[in-house]
């Protein structure tokens, strides 16, 4: 027996060396080669060169196949959870690689259309009017591999979902392990979900861009410095048509011109009579009363239908001033109608020059009649759009696409389509400005500036949300603090003052879970109202904020019994048009979020 034991040990050691240790060292070596190749692939992507990208991808694919083949030699140990996780990670990566190859294959023939250099391109030499048309007519072919890409991404997600982060320690030495795995899974899950949700919209893009028949769209400009429920005061509008990618601007006018095209305005609704200043009739410019953009579109249509300027539209694109600033920041200063516009900050308002210049042109009193005083907005947007199309795709288009998605996510752009399928896809992506249904706790704070000049340019806002459990009930306290650290503007119209910073007159609404019970509402200067709307319970009040002043609203309420403390979740929906709004969320005495409310925030915590 004594002679057998050493033999067994030698066999086990040899087995471990040949079937575990040596495969591990080879896998590690090939993994390091793969990491270096991945860095080169990432660098090639930044170069916007499709030929270089294809070459690096082919190299990476060969090295990944080699790595995968070597990795398979330890899969017989998959009864060990860590090896099973490794296998799922490698196999998931294979599916991602196939999705990436499909994407590259799809765009390669049309690389110049989306900003990838491919030798000398005829697209860059086409007239501005023909570029978008060329892109639209080839879009169907680019989207041809969408289903296979989607399937491979879903297969990769299924593999990654089988990896259990709870098996791993928080750290190994200085290396953070568990949180990195959790974050990677969450980020990929979000990307996968976004891709699946975006597929219906992507497939409809050629139709939206008029491939089969001409489409008509309205652009609504929302002045976020005079904040309204969907992002800002409706200050101007434009009508454009698109046919196989060719765009025609039909009209760009002041919103007051549209209001003047209605012969008889109905009486203003109760909220305007209660909170607005000296307004007794219902105007299109005041129609975005609901924080749910599709609901505000219905109010808009109720008045627009009465206009002799009405056109039958296929969709609405609502934009706020952030889009102008971002585009000027990308393109540089631009001249329109003899006026130079810039994204650079100026001391007159501690804001971008384009914002101040537009207000100076539109709102400063003069001793003559300003015709179509806000139509300059449409002219400026059209100039920026033509400039974007008129430059090489590789220079700006990637940056513009990134900017567009960022502003869609942050609700500086809202979309509405009359086609139910397209509208459903837009809503799924959270680009429709909807008040969402939600099973857990919910909060949306809607602020509306009624006749308070452009004071939202100067007022900053902090929202603090606190959730506690007392006597078996979940109690919520939401505090909103408003501060205006700037002096008042010269609002003497006879002197020709430009009245930007004046007293903010703010109609405030808290949208909370249906059935929540109000305990206290501090800070309202008018009677507090409670009612149900949009599937939520609403607490409503009114306050003012003076220049160099501040105001605070504190709302305390209890949640309905069907929201449980043990599996607590909270969705905070951002108001469109807001920027740099601070949000702090405390649950059970612990701060779980402290940052900027740049987009909707969801937290899940046990109380």
Image (tube, rainbow, N blue to C red):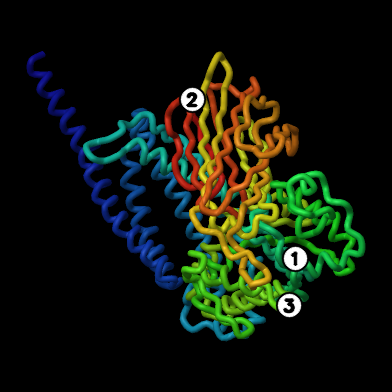
> Which residue bears the numbered disc 2?
606
Image quadrant where one finds the N terminus:
top left
Q: Residue at x 55, y 59 (%)?
A: 488
Residue sticking out furthest to the right: 264
Instruction: Judge the density around disc 3: few (<14), some (14-19), many (≥20) Cα neighbours within 10 Å.
Output: few
Q: Residue at x 57, y 24 (%)?
A: 475
Instruction: Tell me if label 3 and label 1 are in contact, CB under 8 Å.
Output: no
| Label whose residue precedes the other's in the sequence (1 or 2) | 1
Using the rendered image of the protein, determine whether residue 576 is visible from the camera's viewpoint.
yes
CA distance separating discs 1 and 2: 45 Å
Q: Position of residue 325 (x, y in %)?
A: 54, 67
Q: Quick one: SS at disc 1?
A: strand
Q: Where residue 370 is drawn, which disc sits there?
A: 3
Q: Residue at x 43, y 72 (%)?
A: 49
Q: Nearer the viewer, residue 565 or 453?
A: 453
Q: Quick one: SS at disc 2?
A: loop
């Amino acid at each position: 027996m004594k002679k057998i034991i050493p033999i067994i040990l030698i066999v086990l050691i040899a087995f471990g060396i040949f079937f575990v240790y040596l495969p591990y060292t080879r896998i590690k070596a090939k993994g390091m080669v793969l990491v270096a190749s991945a860095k080169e692939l990432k660098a090639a992507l930044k170069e916007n060169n499709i030929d270089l990208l294809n070459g690096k991808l082919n190299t990476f694919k060969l090295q990944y196949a080699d790595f995968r083949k070597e990795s398979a030699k330890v899969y017989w140990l998959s009864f060990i959870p860590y090896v099973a996780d490794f296998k799922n990670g490698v196999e998931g990566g294979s599916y991602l690689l196939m999705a990436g190859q499909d994407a590259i294959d799809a765009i390669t023939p049309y690389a110049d259309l989306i900003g990838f250099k491919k030798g000398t391109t005829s697209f860059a030499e086409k007239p501005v009017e023909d570029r978008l048309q060329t892109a639209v007519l080839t879009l169907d072919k680019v989207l041809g591999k969408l289903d296979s890409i989607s399937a491979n991404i879903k297969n990769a997600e299924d593999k990654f979902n089988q990896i259990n982060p709870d098996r791993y320690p928080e750290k190994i030495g200085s290396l953070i392990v568990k949180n990195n795995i959790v974050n990677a899974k969450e980020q990929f899950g979000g990307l996968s979900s976004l891709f699946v949700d975006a597929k219906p919209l992507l497939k409809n893009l050629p139709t939206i861009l008029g491939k089969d028949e001409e489409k008509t769209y309205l652009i609504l400009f929302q002045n976020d410095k005079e904040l309204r429920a969907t992002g800002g005061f409706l200050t101007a509008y434009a009508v454009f048509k698109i046919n196989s990618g060719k765009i025609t601007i039909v009209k760009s006018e002041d919103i007051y011109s549209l209001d003047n095209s209605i012969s008889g305005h109905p009486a203003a609704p109760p909220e305007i009579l209660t909170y607005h200043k000296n307004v007794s009739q219902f105007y299109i410019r005041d129609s975005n009363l609901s924080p749910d953009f599709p609901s505000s579109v219905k109010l808009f249509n109720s008045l627009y239908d009465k206009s002799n300027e009405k056109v039958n539209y296929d969709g609405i694109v609502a934009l706020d001033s952030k889009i102008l600033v971002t585009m000027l920041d990308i393109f540089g200063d631009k001249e329109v109608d003899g006026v130079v516009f810039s994204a650079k900050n100026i001391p007159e308002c501690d804001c971008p020059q384009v914002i101040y210049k537009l207000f100076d042109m539109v709102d400063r009193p003069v001793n003559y009649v300003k015709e179509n005083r806000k139509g300059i907005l449409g002219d400026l947007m059209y100039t920026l759009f033509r400039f974007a199309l008129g430059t090489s795709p590789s220079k700006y288009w990637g940056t513009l696409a990134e900017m567009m998605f960022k502003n869609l996510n942050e609700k500086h752009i809202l979309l509405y389509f009359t086609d139910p399928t397209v509208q459903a896809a837009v809503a799924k992506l959270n680009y429709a400005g909807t008040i969402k249904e939600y099973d857990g706790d919910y909060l949306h704070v809607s602020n509306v500036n009624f006749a308070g000049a452009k004071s939202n340019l100067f007022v900053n806002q902090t929202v603090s949300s606190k959730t506690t459990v007392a006597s078996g009930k979940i109690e919520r306290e939401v505090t909103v603090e408003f501060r205006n650290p700037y002096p008042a503007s010269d609002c003497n119209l006879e002197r020709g003052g430009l009245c930007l910073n004046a007293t903010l007159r703010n109609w405030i609404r808290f949208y909370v879970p249906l059935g929540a019970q109000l305990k206290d509402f501090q800070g309202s200067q008018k009677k507090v109202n409670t009612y149900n709307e949009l599937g939520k319970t609403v607490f409503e009040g009114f306050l003012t904020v003076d220049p160099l002043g501040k105001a605070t609203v504190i709302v305390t309420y209890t949640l309905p019994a069907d929201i449980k403390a043990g599996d607590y979740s909270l969705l905070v929906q951002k108001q469109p048009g807001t920027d740099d709004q601070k949000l702090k969320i405390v649950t059970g005495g612990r701060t779980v979020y402290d940052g900027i409310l740049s987009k909707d925030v969801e937290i899940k915590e046990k109380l």
